[in-house]
Amino acid sequence: MDRSPPPRAALQKQYLIAYNGLSALLWSILLGRVLLLLGLAGPRHVHAGVGQYAQWTQTVAVLEILHSAFRNPPLPAPPFHPCARPLTTPSPGAPTGLVRSPLLTTTIQVFSRVLLVWGIVAPWPAATGPSPFYSGMLLAWAVTEVIRYSYFVANLRGDGDVPPALVWLRYNTFYVLYPLGIGCEMGCVYLASRAARSRATKLLLWDVLVLYVPAGYVMYTHMMKQRRKVIRGKQPERRRGG
């Protein structure tokens, strides 16, 4: 029996399943805690209950920048087989990444959120934490991430065969969740700018607010493009099935 170690691709797949599964669990816990606190105590107590947990849960996502930046060596050409299924991986000789997510959009999303929890909320918790903006931001993030990471796990485990309900959630809920999250993030930055004492800090925070316009546009249009690709990919299947 061949007891050689599994190929690199299999190890990477198992790592990504574990990472996305753990992330889905962490964000599910955060979502449940935020909803519980909102129901029992209101938004003023959300930061005290989940602030540090939210910080570290979001910080874990810094790994996703490395996932997008990582590049494998070129793939060798597989042996020809007349009954083989068409390849869905990059063509032989092309560099392959650990994930397909574009580095730019991944960096924008992760960096902006890390900035929010460590650079905006943490220095001015009294101004930002009790605000509904903070609770709304965490809700938008948590729902988005539970869907996103669950989608990735299903996609990896099913070799691209994802339950239709999860596909619909992944590529439709962002229409509401992205504007909600971005609006609440901007609200937190605005409250922090009011609480900041130095003029230089206030100006810096206002600059951050201005940057939200192009960054939000990039993120939103990226998801719209992804949605169009998925819909186009499903159409032939519907025609064949009908």
Image (cartoon, rainbow, N blue to C red):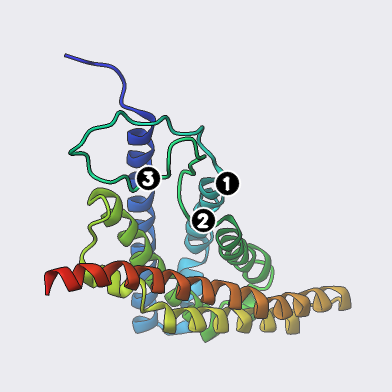
Residue 44 falls left or right of residue 198: left
Residue at 25% x, 49% y is 157
Specify the quadrant that holds the C terminus: bottom left
Residue 101 falls left or right of residue 10: right
Q: Residues within 10 Å of mark 1 (few under 14, many from 20)?
A: some
The kind of residue tagged 1 is Ala
Residue 126 placement (x, y as % from top left): 63, 77
Q: Residue furthest left?
A: 242
The kind of residue tagged 3 is Thr
Q: Vertical placement of 132 versus 57: above or below? A: below
Q: Secondary structure at mark 1?
A: helix
Comparing marks 3 and 2, which lies closer to the viewer?
A: 3
Q: CB of mark 2 within 8 Å of CB of mark 1?
A: no
Q: Which residue is under mark 2? A: 56
Residue 127 placement (x, y as % from top left): 65, 80
Q: Which residue is under mark 1? A: 69
Q: Which residue is under mark 3? A: 89
Q: Secondary structure at mark 3?
A: loop
Q: CA distance from mark 2 to mark 1?
A: 22 Å
Residue 213 placement (x, y as % from top left): 66, 81
Label whose residue precedes the other's in the sequence (1 or 3): 1
Q: CA distance from mark 3 to mark 2?
A: 33 Å
Q: Vertical placement of 55 versus 130: above or below? A: above
Residue 41 falls left or right of residue 122: left
Residue 111 lies in quadrant: bottom right
Residue 72 falls left or right of residue 77: right
Label whose residue precedes the other's in the sequence (2 or 1): 2
